[in-house]
Amino acid sequence: MCDARGNLLDVKDPLAFAIKVLREGKILALRGLGGFHLACDATNSRACKALRARKRRPRKPFAIMVKDLDAAELLVELGSQEKEALVSPARPILLARARKPSPLAEEVAPGLDVLGIMLPYTPLHHLLLKEGKFLALVMTSGNLSGEPLCISNEEALERLKDIADFFLLHNREIAVGIDDSVLRFMAGKPRLIRRARGFVPEPLPYPLAEKNILAFGAHLKNTFTITREGEAFLSQHIGDLEGLETVRFFKKVRAHFENILHVRPQILVCDLHPGYLSTELAEEEARKTGLTLIKVQHHLAHAAAVAGEFGIHPPFLALILDGVGLGDDRALWGGELFSIEACGYQRLGHIFPVRQPGGDAAAREPWRMLLAYLYALYGKRALETFRKLLPETFGAKGEIVFKMLARGVNAPPTTSTGRLFDACAALLGVCYEQTFEGEAPMLLEALAARATESPVFDIPVKHEGRLILDTRRLFHLLLENLENLDRKTLALGFHLSLARGFAQMIRLAARKTGLKRVVLGGGCFQNKILVEEVIRELEKEFEVYFPEKLPPNDGAVSYGQAIWASWKLKLKG
């Protein structure tokens, strides 16, 4: 047992001391199986607030650990399948509906109706929870937000010294860091949200045995994929490639995979986006080695990942609902309907394009997308409506962004479904500024989950060369009903209406192409309400494929890149 300065404490029973300090509301860094966790008493509001402040994680939910299924059922609603998942050897974090009222501190998962809960998976966890008699412990990753996990004692004592009050250490070295996996039951089946401990490096199907491929993945939620003799090995969750530590972790895990698989890449694959660090890493390696580099559009990689998991080959339809990915036309895509064909694809449809003011800033500040949708609806009158909807503090900011929209300066058009969710979250007042990726859609889903019924609004699908789902109409109807219906009813109406609109697009595309197989992918399909409604709308008419062994989000992009490259290489013979 060490203190925050790394001094070894003269403690005869480190476990008893750890239990004592956790009861006192202290924050404990403990070395686990794949890295360090930061732990505190999940019922202690002051401790949870302190952990948030020190970790620089204002609102992103914390995972909790409980001693057994009985304890879990006190906190979340569990069906038989969910119980099986919790006690399985993989021991994932399970996203489950929280029971209300809850004995946990509000700071564990502020504003959400879903808790991330897991059971002990090391002897140390078992002993802490059994002997400490804690209802639940926060058990969150041992890192500063945006950095990889600490795995060595020295690294933890240096990087976590300003977060943890005490360190519980051991001398069992960790070869390569690995996060906890995250699972959510949607449409009656377990679906991975983060694929890591317990699932990696289990191989995935791969249709090409002749060439070893290394796919570099996406910029956010990065993973890489290495193939060998008809199998694909998807790495654990690496993280967002936005810092030097994460890039080092990428390289370390890659070297580890190449060593245990005894494989070296012969072909490289990456995203189209020139600004992604994963793309830069791939291009640098291609220059150094002379290996062929194949670039794959982001949403096509999503589609190919789902197809690869289920072993289906083109042709098929693909509905990919995502934050953003660079399109072949250099535009910002994200709400796309494709016909995937043996020699390529057709972009059959998408949601109505609106401007994304400030580029990436709009992803962090949903109020910008609210103003963008208002501008798409009302033009010059948008600012007046915006001022009525938002607190006064956004007045001056709104004027600047309005000018950007009116002049088309730093406001590229986007078909992003993620930005549509952001705009709706701002419209209904649940999130104006995001502190972590996906916060606005998560809060919007939580609001919708509290409604028992809702009207379904009709969203027209226009034929303008492509099928265009006119989401401006949905926004207009939500605005019209702001005074007649409560926010939770409108939030549910947004989800249900959108699901029906996408299903109608697919029906129209199917009539045109004759295709009856549909794959669903993209980060927006982490939303349980949206997933279940889209599948319910489609399953009577189509063969619907939605990932189980892979996350629907960018964690699957590297695998999809490898699958797409295999199709391309097979065609070339």
Image (tube, rainbow, N blue to C red):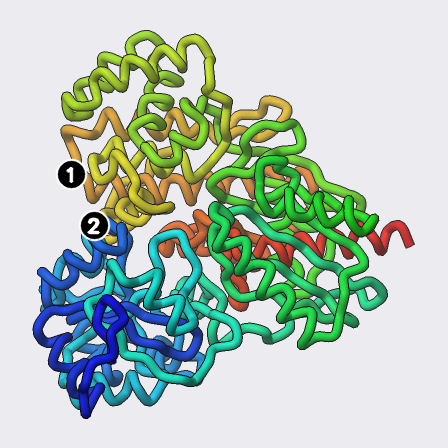
Residue 197 image offset from top left, x and y in percent: 47, 73
Residue 525 disc label: none
Q: Position of residue 553 (x, y in %)?
A: 49, 53
The residue at the point 17 percent across, 67 percent down is 99
Residue carrying label 1: 486
426 on left or right of 502: left
Q: Is residue 538 visible?
A: no
Compute the Cα span from label 1 to label 2.
9 Å
The image quarter in which residue 389 lies = top left
In the picture, the quarter occupied by the C terminus is: bottom right
Q: Quadrant of residue 310?
A: bottom right
Residue 210 point in image, percent of width and height: 85, 65
Q: Residue at x 28, y 68 (%)?
A: 38
Residue 225 x %, y %: 65, 61
Residue type at mark 2: give it: Ala
- Against 306, residue 15 (above or below) is below
Q: Amino acid at mark 1?
A: Asp
Q: Quadrant of the N terminus?
A: bottom left
Between 124 and 516, the one lying in front of the other is 124
In the picture, measured across the screen, residue 94 lies left or right of residue 503, that is left
Q: Which residue is mark 2?
A: 451
